[in-house]
């Protein structure tokens, strides 16, 4: 099987006259990294991997042990659709190994593999479908506020045409790269768009999210437009989230489905949700990793603020979508806090760990919160036992730091590097004096 | 019948006239060769499609010619020897030197049938094996797929699934059968993987061709039209 896969890749490179093979991997913060090799080197790379200096990658090696090995995953080999015909390029995702062939603990893809292995030990396959939001802006200039395309003047074409063309071309490109799209639409905010991906297993989906972000940006850039996954680029309108639909399958059975339950939710689903809720604060630094992320998680913009669940309440952290009758495999839950600037490998690792902890320990699911929580005061919320998500990167880092669950899920290497890196980000932010402060204090104080 | 895959080497030079007549009537392209060195000299870049060796003349020279062909780096796999009925006893000791044999006194039709049998069996691999369906072409030799003449870039598992389906048009397969036949039993993910890949294939085939793979409700998938529908 593996040999055939290898032959398939080598033969395709030959037949399609691929000139350059890009080896893709991801740093700890979720940035796509790539180095290119010639087709002649590919066979060797598939057999023995390619050595490179990991100390050049954020969050990878400590200096004294800097060399690591990129092992291409032949199953992810694909010809890139944006070649001009004369120079065909292909990409393949890599797993990073230590030189002794053990998984490198600084590699987010290996971290997700390890967590999926734990799910598998419990008999589960983890399926994920994300709804990804993003904005199209005019190319940004330093110090300038972003300019939405919809505000006219930027294009000769009417604005709906531009966005429509971009989105259509993006979807076509995604589909040629094995990323089927379920829905897409213009969101409420100006210049904001949403593309919903069809579910796959979690590892494939994390790879797909990496490819997705690149494709959206590439297609936009080709038309002189800047696409951004910044969680809250415009004040006063909705930010960009990456709601994730989750389900666990046991073989071909949806382990979340129970025909006899009012909401068709099985005990496994309820325990999983309870795990997500109980550990929500601890995993938020990973699912919402920027200072800016917390400007999205505020009342009034359809983003979750409270740690609660409901069937029909979009203010909660978890929503249980109503599925068509007689379709057990569609039963799923929607986790609404993550934003598209997260590292998908790490985000899926920690939410899976939280959910599985709930399953393993039989956590009890709290009552549904179907009232509008934004209208309740703190004492009413306290009476219901409903807490809020961390209010800032600093708060979420504190919650993460205390979490053995997150530490185990990420492994010590990434856990410590991430905390160190993000504390520095917070410190840099804290010393910044903003326009808000000038406007509010300069004249009156 | 025209055989593709190049010329058949015929020994000795000149070959028996009965053999020449049969080869010509059957439409084979052939060249007579006098030795292994001669065979190497006249070989086309594609290699010989096979060899026919008449052993009823100088038997020792003929067998050593067979042996030389077998020892080449670039072997000539389909090798038919023609022997007299007295030579039948020699065969057990030389079983490794030929693929099939024919008695020189056999009817021309038998010789032709044996030729076709041994050469066809082997030359089949030399020809690109194509699976075609309404503009979709899969080249099983190069692993390449194209639709309407445009390359269709697939991942390995997408290719394997499409190949299996396209080789069995009109047949309905359950997801479980597809999983075991395409992924193998050791695959862990469950039959939902099949759905994921079918969706990916449909997306790549494009709107126009997405219906090549049809969902058969509560059963599984079918490639192309059912053979019962018009």
Image (spheres, rainbow, N blue to C red):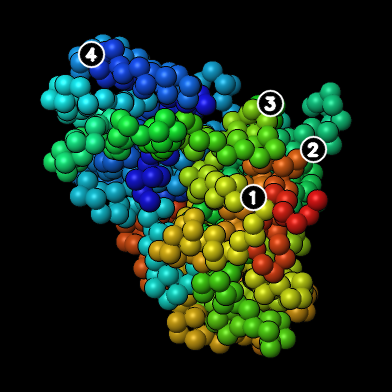
Return the mark for residue B169: 1
Q: Dot 4 surroundings within 10 Å: few (below 14), some, or many (20 or more)? A: some
Q: Is residue A22 above or below residue A424?
A: above
Secondary structure under badge 1?
A: loop
Q: Nearer the viewer, mark 2 or mark 4?
A: 4
**Left or right position of A95 against A229:** left
Q: Are marks 1 and 3 on the same chain?
A: no
Q: Nearer the viewer, mark 1 or mark 4?
A: 4
Residue assigned mark 2: A164
Secondary structure under badge 4?
A: loop
Question: Percent from the top left, x then y, of residue A269?
Answer: 58, 79
Question: Percent from the top left, x then y, of residue B34?
Answer: 23, 13
Q: Residue at x 62, y 53 (%)?
A: B198
Q: Is residue A63 above or below residue B218?
A: above
Q: CA distance from mark 1 to mark 3?
A: 45 Å
Q: Closer to the N terminus: mark 2 or mark 3?
A: 2
* Residue B118 placement: quadrant: top left
Q: Is residue B178 above or below residue B115?
A: below
Q: Residue at x 42, y 49 (%)?
A: A28
* A375 and A179: which is toward the camera: A179
Residue assigned mark 4: B34
Q: Are marks 2 and 1 on the same chain?
A: no
Q: Residue at x 24, y 50 (%)?
A: A101
Q: Residue at x 34, y 62 (%)?
A: A411
Residue assigned mark 3: A224
């Amino acid at each position: 099987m593996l040999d055939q896969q290898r032959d398939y890749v080598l033969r395709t490179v030959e037949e399609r006259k691929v000139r350059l093979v890009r080896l893709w991997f991801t740093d700890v913060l979720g940035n796509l990294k790539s180095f290119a090799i010639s087709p002649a080197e590919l066979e060797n790379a598939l057999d023995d991997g390619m050595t490179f200096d990991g100390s050049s990658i954020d969050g990878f090696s400590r200096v004294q042990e800097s060399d690591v090995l990129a092992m291409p995953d032949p199953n992810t080999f694909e010809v890139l659709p944006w070649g001009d015909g004369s120079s065909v390029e292909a990409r393949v995702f890599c797993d990073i190994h230590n030189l002794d062939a053990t998984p490198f603990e600084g590699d987010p893809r290996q971290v997700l593999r390890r967590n999926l292995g734990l799910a598998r030990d419990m008999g589960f396959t983890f399926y994920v479908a994300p709804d990804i939001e993003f904005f199209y802006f005019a190319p940004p200039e330093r110090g300038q506020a972003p300019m939405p395309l919809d505000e006219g003047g930027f294009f000769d074409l009417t604005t709906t045409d531009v966005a429509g063309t971009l989105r259509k071309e993006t979807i076509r490109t995604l589909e040629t790269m094995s990323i089927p799209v379920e829905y897409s639409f213009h969101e409420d905010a100006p210049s904001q768009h949403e593309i919903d991906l069809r579910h796959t297993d979690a590892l494939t989906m994390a790879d797909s999210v990496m490819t997705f972000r690149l494709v959206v940006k590439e297609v936009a850039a080709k038309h002189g437009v800047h696409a951004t996954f910044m969680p809250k680029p415009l004040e006063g309108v909705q930010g960009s989230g990456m709601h994730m639909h989750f389900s666990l399958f046991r073989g071909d059975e949806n382990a979340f489905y129970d025909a006899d339950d009012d909401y068709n939710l099985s005990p496994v689903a309820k325990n999983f949700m309870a795990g997500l809720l109980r550990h929500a604060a601890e995993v938020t630094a990973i699912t919402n990793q920027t200072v800016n992320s917390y400007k999205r998680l505020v009342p009034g913009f359809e983003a979750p603020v409270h740690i609660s669940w409901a069937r029909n309440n979009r203010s909660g952290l978890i929503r249980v979508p109503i599925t068509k009758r007689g379709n057990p495999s569609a039963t799923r839950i929607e986790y609404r806090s993550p934003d598209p600037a997260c590292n998908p490998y790490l985000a899926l690792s920690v939410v899976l760990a939280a959910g599985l902890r709930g399953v393993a320990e039989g956590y009890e699911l709290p009552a549904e919160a179907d009232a509008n929580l934004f209208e309740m005061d703190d004492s009413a919320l306290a009476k219901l036992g409903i807490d809020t998500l961390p209010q800032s990167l600093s708060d979420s880092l504190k919650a993460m730091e205390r979490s053995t669950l997150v530490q185990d899920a990420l492994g010590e290497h990434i856990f410590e590097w991430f905390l160190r890196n993000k504390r520095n980000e917070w410190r840099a932010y804290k010393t910044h004096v903003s326009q808000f402060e000038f406007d509010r204090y300069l004249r009156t104080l | 019948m025209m055989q593709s895959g190049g010329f058949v080497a015929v020994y000795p030079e000149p070959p028996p006239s009965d053999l020449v007549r049969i080869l010509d009537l059957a439409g084979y392209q052939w060249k007579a060769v006098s030795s292994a060195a001669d065979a190497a000299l006249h070989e086309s870049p594609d290699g010989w499609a096979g060899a026919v060796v008449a052993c009823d003349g100088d038997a020792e020279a003929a067998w050593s010619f067979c042996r030389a062909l077998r020892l080449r780096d670039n072997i000539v796999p389909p090798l038919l020897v023609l022997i007299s009925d007295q030579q039948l006893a020699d065969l057990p000791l030389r079983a490794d030197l030929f693929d099939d044999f024919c008695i020189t006194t056999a009817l021309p039709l038998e010789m032709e049938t044996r030729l076709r049998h041994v050469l066809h069996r082997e030359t089949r691999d030399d020809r690109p094996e194509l699976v075609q369906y309404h503009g979709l072409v899969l080249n099983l030799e190069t692993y390449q797929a194209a639709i309407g003449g445009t390359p269709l870039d697939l991942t390995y598992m997408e290719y394997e699934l499409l190949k299996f389906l396209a080789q069995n048009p009109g047949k309905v397969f359950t997801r479980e059968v597809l999983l075991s036949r395409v992924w193998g039993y050791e695959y862990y993910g469950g039959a939902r993987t099949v759905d994921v890949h079918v969706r990916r294939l449909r997306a790549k085939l494009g709107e126009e061709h997405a219906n090549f793979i049809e969902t058969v409700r509560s059963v599984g998938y079918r490639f192309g039209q059912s053979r019962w529908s018009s």
